[in-house]
Amino acid sequence: MVNNPNKILAVQLRGVVKAYQVSAGKFTAIHHIDLDIVQGEFVAIVGQSGSGKTTLLNLLAGIDRPTSGEVLVADTSLGKLSESDLAEWRGKHVGLVFQFFQLLPTLTVVENVQLPMDFAKNIPTALRRTRALALLDRVGIKDQANKLPAMLSGGQQQRAAIARALANDPPILLCDEPTGNLDSANRLSVLKLFADLNAEGRTIVMVTHERDASSFTSRQVTLVDGRVAIPAGRS
C-alpha cells in the first residue's frame, strides 16, 4: 500500500471483502484488502486465475459492491451511491477496457466511440463526432472510423475500445486483460499506448497475465486467493 501524505489518491480500499452465495455456501473472492493507488500511477493487478483480480476491478468500477469495507475512487465512496448515481459517476470518472472489446457490432467504429458521450451528456452534441474522430486519431485508427467493428483486426478493435473508454475524458482507466485476446505484436503496441496515456497523467489499473507488463507499469499488486500477497511498493 502506498502511504505518502504528499500524494493524491485515486483509489483507496479499506478492509474490503467481497463474498458471494453459491450452491456450496459462501465463497469469499476478496479478503480484507487495503490498497492505495496514487493519481497518475499505472498499476498492474496480477495473479493466477481465480485469485480475485477481475472481482477487484469490478469493485473499483462500481460494477460490484463490497460485502464489507469501503471502496473510494475519485474521492467517492462507491457503496453510498444508488445504481443511477453509480452510472452517472462512472460516466464521468472511469473508462473501462475489456479483453473482448465489447464494441456494438451494428454501429460504426466512430459511433461506438461517440456512444458514451451520448449517455453521459458531458460533451455538447455538436462536438461529439469531432471528439470521437480525434480520439480514433489518437489511437492510430482514424482511417477505420466508418467501418463496422467486424471489419477491423483484433488490435484495431482494442484500440477502438480504448478510444471509447477515453470518450468522456475520465481520469481513471480500468482495464481487464486488455491484451489477452491479441497477438504478441498487438499486445506490445497496446501496452505502449497505455504507457503513453499514463505519461499524460491518467491513472491506469490493469488486470493482466502479460509478462511484459512490468516494463510499462509503475508497480504490480499480486493477488493470491483474494488477498494482496506482496505489499505494493514501487518497483
Image: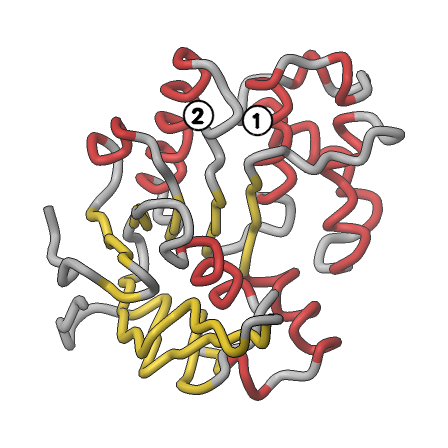
Q: At 49% across and 45% down in the image, what residue appears?
A: 176
Examine the image and state in which quarter residue 64 appears: bottom right
Front-lying residue, 135 or 2: 2
Question: Tag 1: Cα neighbours inside 10 Å, few (<14), some, or many (≥20)?
Answer: many
28 on left or right of 92? left
Residue pictured at 37% horizontal, 52% vertical:
203
Q: Is residue 94 left or right of residue 215?
A: right
Which residue is rendered at x = 74% and y = 50% of the image?
Answer: 117
Q: Which residue is mark 2?
A: 190
Identity of the amino acid at label 1?
Answer: Arg
Residue 37 drawn at (x, y percent): 29, 63
Task: Name the outermost residue toward the right.
Answer: 106
Instruction: Name the residue rendered at 73%, 49% in the picture.
Output: 116
Mark 2 surroundings within 10 Å by alpha-carbon count, few (fewer than 14), some (14 through 19), many (20 or more): many
Q: Position of residue 20 (x, y in %)?
A: 55, 74
Q: Which of the numbered marks, if any, corresponds to residue 183?
A: none
In the image, residue 89 lies at what x, y percent?
62, 70
**Element at label 2:** helix
Q: Earlier in the sequence, mark 1 or mark 2?
A: 1
Q: Report, in whole angstroms, how far the alpha carbon at label 1 lies from the one at label 2.
A: 7 Å
Q: Amino acid at mark 2?
A: Val
Q: Nearer the viewer, residue 218 or 136?
A: 218
According to the image, what is the colour scheme of the structure? secondary structure
Q: Are marks 1 and 2 in contact (CB under 8 Å)?
A: yes
In the image: residue 179, left or right of residue 36: right
Q: Position of residue 199 (x, y in %)?
A: 31, 39
Quadrant of image for the N terminus = bottom left
In the picture, the disc for residue 159 is: 1
